[in-house]
Amino acid sequence: MKRILVLALCTLPFAAHAQQDDRDWLTALLEDNLSGAGRKVTITGFAGALSSEATIDKLTIADDTGIWLTLDNVVLDWSRTALLTGSLSVERLTASEIVLDRLPIASADESLPAPEATPFALPDLPVSVEIGTLGADRIVLGPTVLGQPVEATLTASASLSGGEGKANLTLKRIDDGPEGNVVLTASYANESKVLALDLVAQEAAGGIAATLMGLPGNPAIELTVKGEGPLSDYAADIQLASGGAERLAGKITVGDTPEGDLRFAADLGGDPAPMFLPEYAGFFGSDVKLAASGTKATDGRLIVDNFTLQTQALDLRGDLALAADGLPQRFALKGTLGKDGTPVLLPLTTDLPTSVTHADIVLGFDAAEAETWSADIAMTGFDRADLKLREAKIKGSGVINRADGKPAVSGAFDFAADGIAPSDPALAQALGTGIRGTVGFRWREGYDALQLTELALNGADYSLDGTVNLSGLDNSLSLTGKGALRADDLSRFAALADRPLAGRADMRLGGSYALLGGMFDVTGQINGHALRTGIPEADNLLSGSSTIDISAIRDESGLRLRQLDLAAASLRAMVSGQLASSGSDLSADVDFGDISVLGGPYSGALTGRAHFTGTPEAGTVIFDGTGTGLKVGIAEADALLRGASTISAEAGIAGETVDLRKLEVRAATLAASARGKLALAGSDVSADLKFSDLSALGGSYRGALDASATFTGTPEAGKLTAKASGRNLGIGQSETDRLLAGETRLTADLALAGGRIKVNTATLDNPQLRVAADGSISDTTRQVNLTADLVNLATLLPEFPGRLSVRGQVVDDGSTYRLDLTGQGPGGIDSKVQGTISPDFRTANLSAVGAAQAALANAFIDPRTVSGSIRYDLALRGPLQPASLSGRISLSDIRVSDPSLPTALTGFNGAINLAGGRAALDLTGSVTTGGTIRLGGGLGLAAPYNADLAVQLQQLILKDPQLFTTRVNGNITMKGPLTGGAVIAGNIDLSETELVVPSTGLGSAGGLEGLRHVAEPADVHATRARAGLLETVSNAAGGSGRPYPLDLRISAPQRLFIRGRGLDAELGGELRLQGTTANVVPSGSFNLVRGRLDILGKRLTLSEALLQLQGDFDPFISILASNDDGEIVSSVKIEGQATDPKITFVSQPELPQEEVLSHLLFGRDLTSLSAFQAAQLASAVATLAGKGGDGIIGKLRKGFGLDDLDVSTDAQGDTTLKAGKYISSKAYTEIEVDQNGQAKINLNLDLSKTVTLRGSVGGEGETSIGIFKEKDY
């Protein structure tokens, strides 16, 4: 307000000619000069510029958010002639209404501070201002000004005439709020020196003062100050009341002494505790006293004889004497807070309650006794929500004197704090539990400086030391000094920085700084050792010693960076230059001789230089960088960066536009460049890429690639054109490489509008593949027409020659995307996709109908193959989730084969029905070896893919020609999540099973150890992959999914034969597989029914035979056959895995194995064998060792279709022929014929699992019959 009037009145003498045209010239002048950043002044109806009464109809002041102050009907009654004396005399200034809606908002200046420093200067006003009378009929304050809306009136008057002055002021609240008023009457006469003062301020309950002070209950408040009398003996009574009760009262007196000095005294007391929260009662108590008395001597000395402040918890007493120049002659202060060890809650304005258990202060100095001063302050039990201190102490001492006749003060304060416990754990870790320190100082009149001769702070393993001079105390205030910071263990600051800091660091800094002008001149150095930041590359770089040197000056010309150097390991970075508003010039250099210090895969060297000139609004940036042998751990990038690589760029900045004059990247066989203009309003950029040999990327990449692109406009409205040409491109994937053979050309013309992409044209063309798209646009729709042709599908699938074509269109009508696509080609391909997709790709209404040959998948499942026909009729309606998928997939005559399996699935027919997020399967087929399989049940289409599947096996023949042949019937179920945990259970019955003990081991010859294929062609690699000859890395930890629980029963009551190496045994029994697929737990076994071991016609009846699984699906067998020749009991034992059992010979009494075999075969010792018998013995050893094969007897048995055929010789050389055959599942017949032609028929009939009926009939009529009960243990 004052500034507005001053400027208005100063312009009036120059505006005489504008009396009739005030608005055009003077009003505009006032508004333009009074307005500024974040402040707009508007004046309406300014009149009477040259009269004694000027008026303004309305004056408003606004900030960035609107008007905050309004004055209506302003009247100024002033003296024009007073301006001639350089002063402004205002008789009357009134307004009908003043509205302050809110306090103004400070202007937010988001720009960076200017580099130049600005010297300090006080504002210079054109004239002095004195206002006599001020009044407002109505003052309106918004609710945010004083915490509640207020309306009031103001009347005031003042007069000064003939050495006498009077002032009156009345401010009264007139709205519906609590009543309140302030009345002031004051007068003074120079001749009588009588001062009269009468001030009454009153507010009802809930008033402004009580609310702002936060008084409990918002009581009524009344303050009175009354006094009248000559200044030589003046007294004023002061009273403060709340809620109608006196809280503080007392008297202030002023008088003369006989010596002419001025004496003063104050004595106040009362019970102010009710004006504060009840929690503060312990501090105030019910009797608070404040007393002070002293003298202001005529020679300028100030003496306070007594100062006393007493509350229930605080007792503070002292005295003071100051010389005329303000230098202390004596002072003493002694105080105590807290008396009985109970924490005292302090009445502070902070939001956090603060309490102290005890505190003492003692200050002392008396120049009459000595020049030294002392201070001793101690505190215990500091407690606040964010900080606790067990103990804190400050001790000080020094000198106060007049060195060389000039006042001087010096000294030092030592401080210490223990038991520091911040509530923030990170801050607690950083500070530690205790700190120590010292502040030394020196001041002397005339030197215009305060010297901090010592600054020291010490923690557990950190410290701060320095000295500072604060000069220019009368004007510019500047600092000069130096300091050092040391941190031996940065890990204590890790939590505070929220980074895993570690290592040691120290910093030294020196220079000067102007507090008011912002000028500085500093130099410094930071040293680090074994620093860690939690960034692996930075940690490796800083693992040794690192240094930062800085030297900079800021003055009126700007900021000059003389030096900013970083040195760490093999890195050196340097920045220097000038920063100024008118134009900067900065340079930066980086020399990274060996980036392997970053660790990991990095290696090579890197250098670069950047240069900036100009301003952020109009400048130029230039950058050049060179790399040598760079590696970053990405195989393709490492291959590309082999040798030398460079980047060069130059860009101009003009406002919000970047002029990219040059951007070039070169590396190995790559050359890339870009240029153009980048701007928010619209860009025009082009780029080129030339890759002369993609094999530089390593791996299986090959070919050459040239590409270019141009973009104009903005992302909301722009155009992108691109074209590329590739020659014999390859990525190492045989099918893709075949598609990309020859020259491949790509073109695209795209438009961007409203965040969407419009395809004008796009083509991909090479000898094998042609794809084209073109678009059209109308007021409401955009349409893209698609055509794609694979010239010959045999390129990917040799068994399907012919063209594969896709045709269709995609239409965007603003609300949905409509699709209509068809595909046709060889192999019965006939497909149609129609429907809509939402613009956010969250929902769809699509249908897909068609047919194809299953063999189309062979290229993707190699080396497995599939054949047959597939038809599908599917729909996707709703969210893009499996639950929205429905329809049917029909399979016809499907055949699946896998080279790793001994049989193939064939003739599979059936359907898969999809609905409700599940697939219902009903498939039936057979295997090539014989038998059928039926698969039925349901399967979830989303994780965890819960299944309820059932597999039925009927007369399924499984065989491994070298190991086994069996016929299987059974039912197996799989229930639960397929991601892990599904239970596999069921029953499997084996019939007509034959396990062959191989003549030799089943291991393959394998490959040559250490064989490595060099420059292997892709087709050779694919052939070895299909043959399973590639090395694979197994995951020792197994899959991440849960295993499948097992509960399978495998039953074979009889007719499970083990044959080979002279062995012919029949077993029966049951196995149980439990546990999980990761840990199979088998139980049960197949045990001997009957059997023998034939060696050179010598038949040994088996006494034991066992087959079981022991955690491996290669069966374990244990067989024992014995012979007793009256003298020696000899036995042969076959035991081990069925693929490679071990043979041993034992006897009673114990003999060498060859002797045991001699007795076993011929009933005599080794030395008594004939030459023919020795040959037979060698043949027997070969047979048992697996060298003899089936032999004639075995081949005859198979030729006649018998289950048993045996020729045996006894100890006397008599020969017997025996043949056996199952005539039913429970009846077994056997015929024996000796060398004399005598025959015998044996018949075994199994009545149950444990009861057998046996009978025989001889050629001479002898018969026998018996019932046998057998049980396995």
Image: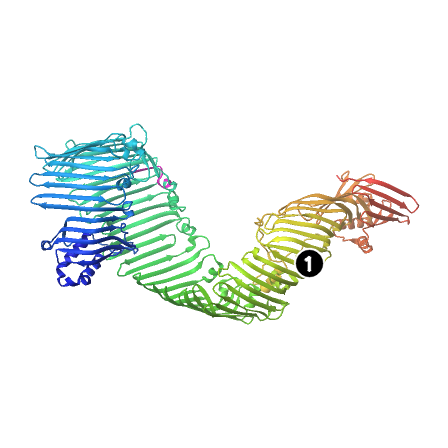
In the figure, is residue 898 to the left or right of 671?
Answer: right
Image location (x, y in percent) of residue 101: 27, 50
Whether the magenta-drawn stretch holds residue 1022 is answered as no
Mark 1 neighbour density, 10 Å: few (under 14) some (14–19) many (20 or more)? some
Q: Is residue 1098 above or below residue 906?
A: above
Instruction: Name the residue type under label 1.
Output: Ala
Residue 768 at least partly seen: yes
Image location (x, y in percent) of residue 175: 26, 45
Q: Foreground residue, 280 or 677?
A: 280
Image location (x, y in percent) of residue 81: 9, 55
- Disc 1 is placed on an element classified as loop
Residue extent of the magenta highlight = 428-436
Whether the magenta-drawn stretch holds residue 430 is answered as yes
User: Residue lying farthest right?
Assistant: 1260
Quarter where residue 341 is shown: top left
In the figure, is residue 1246 to the left or right of 1079?
Answer: right
- Residue holding disc 1: 904
Q: Foreground residue, 928 or 320?
A: 320
In the figure, is residue 104 to the left or right of 594?
Answer: left
Image location (x, y in percent) of residue 168: 15, 43
Quarter where residue 861 is shown: bottom right
Quarter where residue 185 is shown: top left
Residue 396 at least partly seen: no
Q: Is residue 1207 above or below residue 1266?
A: below
Q: Looking at the image, which residue is at 71% across and 57% down? A: 926
Where does the C terminus fall, quadrant-wise? top right
Q: Looking at the image, which residue is at 32% across and 54% down? A: 565
